[in-house]
Image: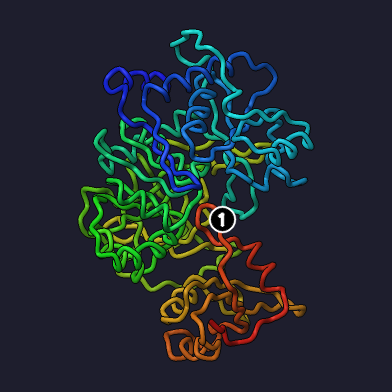
Amino acid sequence: MLTEIRRIRRRTPDAVAVRCGTAGGEWVETSWDQLCDDAAAVAARARQVTGADPVIVVVDGTAASVATVIGVVQAGLDVVLMEEKSSYLSDPRSPVDAVGATLVVGPADPDAAAVAAAKGRTYLEYGRFRAPDDGDDGPPPRVSRILQLTSGSTGEPRVARQTMPGVLQGAEAYRDLFEFTESDVILVTVPLAHSYGLAGMFASLISAATLVTIPRFSIRSLLAALDDDVTVLLGTPMVYRLVSPVLNARRRSARVRTALSAGGPMTTEVADAARQALGTPVRQIYGITEAGLVACVPRSVTQWPPGSVGHPAPGVRLRIDSEPGPDDDELPPQPAPDGSRTGRLYVWTLAMFEGYVGSTAPHLTEDGFYDTGDVVRLDADGVLTVLGRKGSFINVGGRKVNPRRVERLLSEHPAVRDAYVFGVERSDGEEEIHAAVVLDPQTYVDQVLAHCRAGTLMPYEIPHHVHVLERMPRTGMGKIDRAEVLAATRQPARAAVVRG
């Protein structure tokens, strides 16, 4: 990776490699010349490290964090990628502990340093993890691994091992499928420590494009970035849901030519609003940490079925398992056009991971496929639609309810700002449907339930309990934080009306 950056520096040393937003609203720009020097200095320092492999790197979106990742990889060390302020660094039962890392490199943060010390680790600020470049421009002494937190197909947090060539394979796919060039300004709105953000980061770098990050996400910082000639936007459904109304109200055209979304399904309403706001459609991406990019809607495609994630990416093989099994009753019948297949998705890609840290159990099937745990529909034309997770269906009196479908109907109510549906087991073993919602002021829960009854839901699919929240807890990737939602809904119930 550093070799490629050196090539780019020789062509355009003063061009902007990374533009990072700050909490104060300013933008800090780092040239290819500076990024190259910083990464080389990190590599020189990392080569001096003994007994500290892998290295935990807190990736906060700054150029310093980007240079640190590049330098550690160039030195042939493994890298554990973490978000800033991640609770997994302090959690006494954190899966990160199984990695055995003793060194953490991150931004200036006394609290983080104290947490590291409590775990017996050394904490170094980015600027201190540097050494004079020794001029070593050779290849890394070994293939580095990128270690990332993932829920896998079980929902339990684990650390997945991915090779650096596998990560770059995914970055090259992004570059080619979405036609990134050195003329692009690529805004990544998600944490770079996640697989989607990391792919965006490396795709930007190998394309010689300008990478734009906003470590402290806010609508204001996002709008400021878009106003500064951003041509490619990587976001989540939440990002597009939040920014589209503001952009449409401003009626100011953006330069975005390609908009990508990952991290969850996007409703038709959000997709339509984003297209109107940006002047370009939002292209869905379906990928997983364990296997990289699985499917997408590339730039060459102009039309695709709403709600789908496009065709399999190059080199990807899919298997739809609809064979009877011990838990086959968890798959409710899905109406599908002739020629389509519905079932549990298994994938094989060119970027398959090497397994989970601390686990010796097989992570792939005997023929090398990974069980995603997702229920999908593959139509006769090869277009993939993700229907939900097999284990996510709620058992209501022997009937299986898809919570994502209930969420979609709830979200169609004009006063429902956000919704999350989940199952709760009663003392008698039966499950009930619970819905956490964020509502407009002066909206009653009864109105929302009436909307459900008037919709396409069967009586057994209507939520038994509706919890009104001030806001929906979400992770840095924009995904709903299930643990936080469960904690919030265990609090004493609020009034059924939300007052402004």
Of 417 and 403, nearer the camera is 417
Classify 190 as above or below 17: below
Horizontal side, residue 491 vs residue 403: left or right: right
- Which residue sits at x=34%, y=38%? 173
The residue at which mark 1 appears reads as 475
- Which residue sits at x=66%, y=62%? 483
Can residue 433 be seen in this snapshot? no
Horizontal side, residue 396 vs residue 94: left or right: left
Classify 382 as above or below 132: below
Q: Which amino acid, mark 1? A: Thr
**Quarter of the N terminus within the rendering:** top left
Label 1: how many Cα within 10 Å (few below 14, some 14–19, many 20+): few
Quadrant of residue 19 within the rendered picture: top left
Of 221 and 456, nearer the camera is 221
Of 287 and 474, nearer the camera is 474
Q: Residue furthest top?
A: 135
Q: Where's residue 229, x and y in %?
A: 27, 46
Can residue 115 be seen in this snapshot? yes
Quadrant of residue 334 within the rendered picture: bottom left
Classify 497 as above or below 34: below
